[in-house]
Amino acid sequence: MGYHFRIMGVVNVTPDSFSDGGLYLDPQVAIAHGRQLAAEGAEILDVGGESTRPGAEPVSSEEELRRVMPVVEGLVGARTTTAVSSPTISIDTAKAAVARAALDAGATLVNDVTALRGDPEMAAVVAQSGAECCLMHMRGEPRTMQHGRGEEWYDDVVDDVKAFLEARMAFAVERGIAEERILLDPGIGFGKTVEHNLQLLRRLPELAALGRPLVAGTSRKSFLGRLLGDAPPAARLPGTIATCVLAYERGASVLRVHDVAPVRAALTVAAATLGAR
Ligand code: HH2
């Protein structure tokens, strides 16, 4: 099973996500979308109520809870009644109150783009629940992360991301989160130039050496648009597929995507090829 991968399907319950903002604000529509992604083969459904796109405005806990909880509950409920697919429910949040509510409702993974830096209560909430936890690298914060000249931000982007992830993992373990429950993510597109993103993908084996499953989130991101003649998000699927296959071949085992069926098909072929004897 050295070539196992998991697809994490994106369920954005936001008015302003960069590629699908406003499409799934109605909980029933979001639940139907999540079920569809599970039927397409997503083993994880990542439910988020706050956009992290550059320039996005922060959302209050109350509003984030109002957006995500009906969807988490609906997808957890759907899971027990659907024999074929029982996806892991992930909550994409930096807020401990939102994580706690989602975990209480049956989510078992916390995807925190701040890597436990955003809320001082978050580490304890994750530790107590025994949930899996994804720690992602981000330089700056979403509102401002693309403002600076990113070139100046890193000595060597891969070394810097690796050192950061190592330190955040040590912090998590010290706070009682089992190492076996930790996933690591280079944070493609978060405070990084096109070149940084490409270099992180090419040198992913250096991050895989940290010994934890790697998550790669390239789906529809703007660096793909830049490489494809300013293609809008809907036209970035070929770039998403190329980067997911490469990331997988270089050690990522969780691919976070909006377009589950085509990425799953591409990875199935890639896995068969890599496993050929
Ligand atoms: N990317 C986004 C959001 N959450 N989490 C992880 N672990 N890794 C990522 O690369 C990642 C993430 C951004 O994508 P999306 O959710 O589609 O957009 P928005 O943040 O605008 O809702």
Image (cartoon, rainbow, N blue to C red):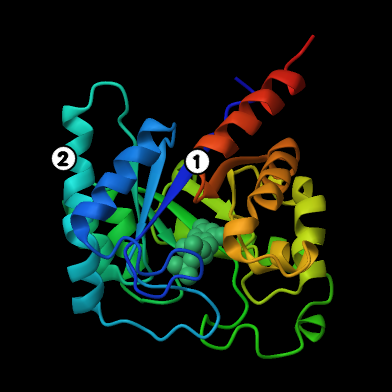
Image quadrant of residue 166?
bottom right
**Element at label 1:** helix
Q: Is residue 144 left or right of residue 108?
A: right
Give the mark toward the camera: 1 or 2. Answer: 1
Q: Is residue 56 left or right of residue 30?
A: right
One can see residue 125 in this view = yes
Which sits in the foreground, 2 or 260?
260
Q: Residues within 10 Å of mark 2 (few under 14, many from 20)?
A: few
Kindly identify which residue carries mark 2.
Answer: 77
Ligand 1 lies under 8 Å from the Cβ of mark 1: no
Q: Position of residue 250 (x, y in %)?
A: 75, 41
Q: Position of residue 95 (x, y in %)?
A: 32, 72
In the rendered image of this protein, does residue 196 appear above or below residue 45?
below
Q: Position of residue 53 (x, y in %)?
A: 52, 75
Residue 151, numbered circle: none
In primary-sequence order, the first of circles 1 and 2 is 2
User: Which quadrant of the figure contains the N terminus?
Assistant: top right
**Element at label 2:** helix
In the rendered image of this protein, does residue 29 appear above or below residue 232?
above
One can see residue 135 in this view = no
Q: CA distance from mark 1 to mark 2?
A: 21 Å
Image quadrant of residue 12?
bottom left
Q: Position of residue 27 (x, y in %)?
A: 20, 58
Q: Is there a contact, CB below 8 Å, between mark 1 and mark 2? A: no
Kindly identify which residue carries mark 1.
Answer: 260
> Hey, what amino acid is under mark 2?
Gly
> Hey, what amino acid is under mark 1?
Val
In the rendered image of this protein, does residue 144 appear above or below residue 80?
below
How many marks are shown on the rendered structure?
A: 2
Image quadrant of residue 36?
top left
User: Which quadrant of the figure contains the C terminus?
Assistant: top right
